[in-house]
Amino acid sequence: MKKQKNKQEGITLIALVVTIIVLIILAGVSISMIVGENGIITQAKTAKEETIK
């Protein structure tokens, strides 16, 4: 009789942690691009003020 190994495949804890870290980095970059000094919101406000002038 052959013994069957209990083989479980799935995501490992290391892969999960790496994925979460990458997502946090991407979120930080996205937020800084939107809210930063030269972000989209700041540029929109500047364009609005120049359009009003």
Image (spheres, rainbow, N blue to C red):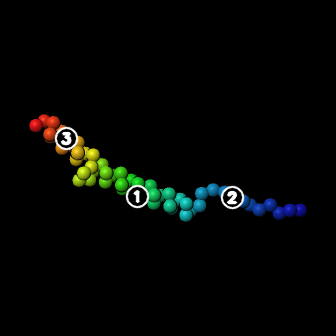
Residue 18 on image: x %, y %: 50, 61
| Depth check, front residue: 50 or 6 | 50
**Res 53 quadrant in image:** top left
- For disc 3, the neighbor class at 10 Å (few under 14, some 14 to 19, many from 20) is few
Residue 6 on image: x %, y %: 74, 60
Type of amino acid under label 3:
Ala
Work out which residue is located at the far top of the displayed protein and give it. 52
**Res 24 quadrant in image:** bottom left
Q: Disc 2 or disc 1, which is closer to the eye?
A: 1
At 13% across and 35% down in the image, what residue appears? 52
Label at residue 8: 2
At 25% across and 45% down in the image, what residue appears? 41
Residue named by callout 3: 47
Q: Disc 1 or disc 3, which is closer to the eye?
A: 3
**Res 12 quadrant in image:** bottom right
- Element type at marker 3? helix
Type of amino acid under label 2:
Gln
**Separation of disc 2 and disc 3 at Cα?**
56 Å
Work out which residue is located at the far left of the displayed protein and give it. 53
Residue 50 on image: x %, y %: 14, 40
